[in-house]
Image: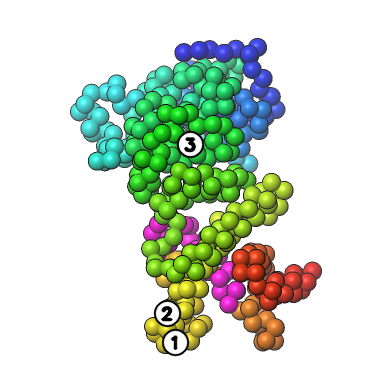
Amino acid sequence: MNIINKKNYNIKKNNISKNAIKVLNRLKKTGYQAYLVGGSVRDLLLGKKPKDFDVTTNATPEQLRKIFRNSRLVGKRFRIAHVMFRTEFIEVSTFRGNQKNISKYQNYKKNKKTINGMLLSDNTFGKIEEDAQRRDITINALYYDITNYSIRDYVQGISDLKQRTIRLIGDPETRYREDPIRILRVIRFSVQLNMKIEEKTAEPISRLANLLKNIPSARLFNEIIKLLETGKSYDIYQKIKQFNLFQLLSLFPKIKMSTHTKNLIQLISTITLKTIDNNIQKKINNNFIPEFFFSAILWYIQIEMTMNIQKEKKIEKKEAFLFSINKILSEFSLLLALPKQIISTIKEIWKSQFYIEKIFNDINVKLPNKKIFHQSCQLLLLRAETEKNMQLYKIFQYLINQSK
Ligand code: ATP
Ligand code: MG
């Protein structure tokens, strides 16, 4: 273990959340060990302002609950405390144990694994040294002690940070099998932080690609949102394709699609990701990213399905369109646990497309309502670009002028 003192790095104190400092001081005063850890330490060392702060300690969740009246316990796989403040919450976790250090019987009982080696529960407490081994990559396993401004490094994370290297802790294959989401995290961090993936960490990725199917839908959804929020989602998408993972990510309902539809989806995905990245970089329209993304990438499946249903059931287009919306979104929810709110917004955005296309022919068509107006116009513009469709461009222009 290396202890690095403050002469050897530069952390801007202003970048540390006052609330995180309060939590750390309180734990220390109560007699516990407490460190800042994870992405926040990594980002502080890189000179960035972290977006959230994780604290780790030897206090158990129940003890944390007593120390912080403004806290609640969350999590099934591993119980952690959220200490709530007005503008943010600080996540406080208890040091996690290394399963190798407990007996086989305990291991069997406490840390159930599937045949693939995936950990279903991971609920053993341990010492800080073990906690470090349980983290994903070395640069995410640095512990910052704010009382003496020192950093504890059990996994050569500082050296990897300097060499801009993403390296899994421990045996990469075992770590990917335990938790396949690490495959996506490694790729995301390498693009997000512009770092190279160390050879042994990169090697198993394509080979183990099939494990992606085992990621629970709620965790996959959270990770997709994180990918989209990096502002580099197009580059991440490219890298995911380079590793031949894209077709294994369950992003599309298992519905037969024509080649034409598949091509349109490719096109609209690219334009959508570039638009999201551009908006994030310019800090505009950062709300509703998931609604925007999913309504766009699933749009042409919706169109094809509408046509098929119309033919099959011999019903009106509008009816088929509405029928198809429900069918696609309910199948899709099985793959990615989309929150209800997001599903209902996507529905509204889609329905609005049906009406606004008629805006020049039918004077009774209403403009999309305020809540989804911007998103509806954006989807219309994406469609216009994807199909190189002048008529859709004109409607888009018309709507924008109306809204001024
Ligand atoms: P971000 O900037 O995306 O928040 P982060 O590194 O803080 O990055 P979190 O998902 O907030 O990522 O997780 C906090 C810390 O928990 C990580 O830095 C890492 O140490 C640990 N961690 C998160 N996910 C995993 C995982 N799947 N396996 C092992 N450790 C993990
Ligand atoms: Mg974080």
Q: Is residue 347 magenta?
A: yes
Q: Position of residue 276 (x, y in %)?
A: 63, 53
Q: Earlier in the sequence, mark 3 or mark 1?
A: 3
Going 47% across and 77% down the picture, which residue do you hit? 306
In the rendered structure, the answer to whether residue 59 lies left or right of residue 341 reads left
Quadrant where the C terminus lies?
A: bottom right
Report which quarter residue 178 is drawn in: top left
Going 25% across and 29% down the picture, which residue do you hit? 107
Mark 3 — residue?
Answer: 186
Q: Earlier in the sequence, mark 1 or mark 2?
A: 2
Q: Position of residue 243 (x, y in %)?
A: 45, 43
Mark 2 — residue?
Answer: 309
Q: Amino acid at mark 2?
A: Ile
Whether 126 is drawn above or below 379: the answer is above
Cα distance in 3D space between marks 1 and 2: 8 Å
Q: Is mark 2 within 8 Å of ligand 1?
A: no
Cα distance in 3D space between marks 3 and 1: 48 Å
Q: Are marks 1 and 2 in contact (CB under 8 Å)?
A: yes
Magenta segment main secondary structure: helix
Closer-to-camera residue (239/275) = 239
Give the residues drawn in magenta, as a range. Answer: 331-354
Residue 37, can we see it?
Answer: no
Residue 315 — which label? 1
Dot 2 crowding, Cα within 10 Å, few <14, some 14–19, many 20+: some
Q: Is residue 214 magenta?
A: no
Name the secondary structure under disc 3.
helix
Dot 1 crowding, Cα within 10 Å, few <14, some 14–19, many 20+: few
Q: Position of residue 66 (x, y in %)?
A: 46, 31
Whether 254 is drawn above or below 222: the answer is below
Report which quarter residue 7 is drawn in: top right
Q: Amino acid at mark 1?
A: Ile
